[in-house]
Amino acid sequence: MPRKTSSNNKSAKLTINNKTYDLPVYDSTAGEPVIDISGLHSQAKVFTYDPGFTSTASCESKITFIDGEKGILRYRGYDIEELAKKSDFIEVVNLLIYGDLPNKEQLKKYKKLITRHTLLHEQIINFFQGFRRDAHPMAMMVGVMGALSSFYQDSLDIGDAHQRQEATRRIVAKSATIGAMAYKYSIGQAFVSPKNNLTFSENFLHMCFSNTAESFKVSPIISKAMDTIFILHADHEQNASTSTVRLAGSSGANPFACIAAGVSSLWGPAHGGANQAALEMLEEIGHSKNIRKFINKAKDKKDPFKLMGFGHRVYKNYDPRAKILKRICQKVLNHVGIKNDPILKLAIDLEKIALKEKYFIEKKLYPNVDFYSGIILKAIGFPPEMFTVIFAIARTAGWTAQWTEMIEDPIQKIGRPRQLYTGQNNLKYGAKRSKKNTR
């Protein structure tokens, strides 16, 4: 049974065929209370039906809190805007995994532990050479992340706390190296080794954009923007990819396989690929004079066009991450010499018009994090194919924290969702066959 966060003995009553069942109600420390239905089937022989689990809490967690109505995102109780302003990515990783902010000595030690794991085994280069040159970087990310389990067999015992910690550090550290190698491979350049004297974000930029022909200096403005993007994408409660990691982990699968599963889920255009889709949408619109035409297309239920970068499954207010990136976006564009970027102008104009439209107001379609992140990453120099890879690198922080929390939860069990079966029943072989010649 879940651990109660309140001792008020609340309960809900569910009546089925004139029989009433009492269901415990637990209070969250923040957010809505939850009704415990874990014993419902044993008592009433019924399941609940909740497509997409939009009204179901699959676990108890102390990591991330979202209030979609108010536009709030907090990691371990800390507001995302404060962390983006005052912290750095590795400190946020430490916070998510261990539960509180480290002191200076702890942080210094943790950064060293992460840094010493950034190198990849030399044989992993052979994995990349097995991919076609035009393979999507996320395909490489999925394959190589899963393959890490064959190289680091000393951190596969999920029952050993030390091995779990070692695995989480390796996943976070090596994800940036894998991502950078995927980028280099896709553009036909030699891999660049990480440097221990650089920060996590500086190192990632260095591995992506430096080469043997010329020196490369990491810009503080760009590295800060990169670090902020990593922080903002580090975790986001029980989203599709995080739930995938937890579900895979519930079977006892090794941590590298679980994170590879998360990367696969993130690859979907409705999840991690949304920032690439938002940028492609802006490029399709092309100019501010075309905004009205495309807004009308978005409002037309018969038109397949969707206004990407607006609206969110959870947020029914302005995405707090989008507010932060909107400010950073102009700084980055000014720094790289794009003072009057037409795509940025189009994005701002589109936002202004859409926020005044009755259609968007009624449906609470506010700008989300994908709306500006794609513009920033493009300005830094990344192609759209790398956007989701960068998302995955950041999300290794949340995935490993969530995976660790699940493993250490004494009531965790293998995930096994139920179903509402609506298929045919009890057919006799040969009694009914399809009349179609092809399938």
Image (tube, rainbow, N blue to C red):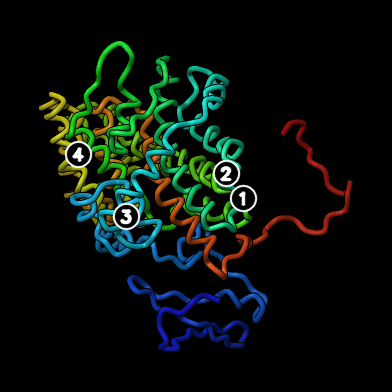
Residue where numbered disc 1 is placed: 253
- Provide the secondary structure element on which disc 1 rests: loop
Task: Specify whether 393 is left or right of 327.
Answer: right
Q: Earlier in the sequence, mark 4 or mark 3?
A: 3
Residue 359 visible somewhere in the drawing: no
Mark 3 secondary-structure assignment? helix
Of badges 3 and 1, the one in the foreground is 3
Q: Residue at x 31, y 56 (%)?
A: 315
Distance between mark 3 and mark 2 Cα atoms: 29 Å
Few, some or many C-alpha atoms within 10 Å of disc 1 (few <14, some 14-19, many ≥20)?
A: some
What is the number of the mark on residue 350? Answer: 4
Q: Tag 3: residue type? A: Gln
Sequence-first tag of 4 and 1: 1
Quarter of the image with the N terminus is: bottom right
Disc 2 and disc 1 in contact, CB within 8 angstroms: yes
Query: To which residue does mark 2 refer?
Result: 257
Q: CA distance from mark 4 to mark 3?
A: 45 Å
Circle 1: residue type: Ala
Dot 4, crowdedness within 10 Å: few (<14), some or many (≥20)?
A: many
Q: Residue at x 51, y 76 (%)?
A: 36
Between 142 and 48, the residue placed more toward the observer is: 142
Q: Quadrant of the C terminus?
A: top right
Q: Earlier in the sequence, mark 4 or mark 2?
A: 2
